Amino acid sequence: MTNNPDGIVLIATPRSPFARRIRLALGMRGVPHDVRMTDVFQPSPELLESNPLALVPVFFDPASGEWIPDSDTILDVLDESPVLARSSLSPIWPVHSVNRPRVRLRSRWATGLMTATVAHFLERARAGAPDPEVLAEHENAIRRTLDRVESDLGRHPDFWGAGSDPTQAGWDLAVALAYLDLRMAALNWRNQHPQCSQFLEICEKNQEFQATRPPVA
Ligand SMILES: N[C@@H](CCC(=O)N[C@@H](CS)C(=O)NCC(=O)O)C(=O)O
């Protein structure tokens, strides 16, 4: 039994990059919570009850008494949570109104990488032969986005927190790159994206990042 006075619960899977970004956001701030691991391919009654879409992550928000699906929505709820405010913990998104959308934009690129990698994996895993056009579409989106991130890391390092303290976009990028390693190792993304590679290397030194590493498939 963990010490969880606020009653925060996260339903997750060990490999979901969307769940990992929430596990990191909570873990790095030391917010007490319980993680309940599930299997999305054989959804438990608890998962179906908390999220009829049967997707993880799902977050129990003690302030509203509701189960919140979708990692972006969960981060928004956390950002305004009395738990963060009470303990003066760092907000999820920058407080400064000019920087906020710029960090969120970059976070969107990173979660877009996660979405395309999950879709590519599911296409390969589905019964019957995968559609090469669908696979190519996802792979092209991943390559284009990696190219954009690679140049942006040099141009706007602060919005990623490159070289110092990763922003939410920075952690999202690290999670997305690690997920690419797990699901699409053959892409060899490091070859043409040295800045991304260096960024991930730095994030990998973080204890919480290590603690949430997905098990090898
Ligand atoms: N937009 C959602 C995406 C969630 C999502 O796609 N989760 C995947 C795991 S990585 C899932 O639950 N998949 C179950 C399925 O496809 O049946 C988020 O940000 O949380």
Image (tube, rainbow, N blue to C red):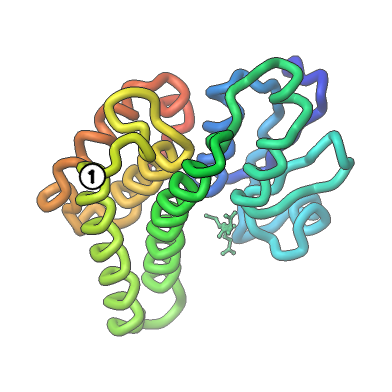
Give the residue at x 74% y 53%. Answer: 47
To which residue does mark 1 refer?
155
**Secondary structure category for the residue under label 1:** helix
Residue labelled 1 has its Cβ within 8 Å of some atom of ligand 1:
no
Location of residue 210 in the rendering, given as x and y in whole percent from the top left corner: 40, 26
Q: Is residue 49 visible?
A: yes
Most foreground residue, 169 or 61: 169
Q: In the rendered view, tell whether residue 120 sits above or below residue 32.
A: below
Q: Amino acid at mark 1?
A: Arg
Most foreground residue, 44 or 188: 188
Decide: few, some or many residues near mark 1? Use Cα within 10 Å; few <14, some 14-19, many ≥20. few
Most foreground residue, 114 or 15: 114
Give the residue at x 25% y 65%. Answer: 144
Q: Is residue 14 visible?
A: no
Q: In the rendered view, tell whether residue 12 sits above or below residue 34.
A: below
Location of residue 147 in the rendering, given as x and y in whole percent from the top left corner: 21, 58
Query: If the image is split into quadrants, where does the N terminus sit?
Result: top right
Query: In which image quadrant can residue 70 be found?
Result: bottom right
Give the residue at x 28% y 69%. Answer: 139
Q: Quadrant of ligand 1?
A: bottom right
Location of residue 32 in the rendering, given as x and y in whole percent from the top left corner: 69, 21
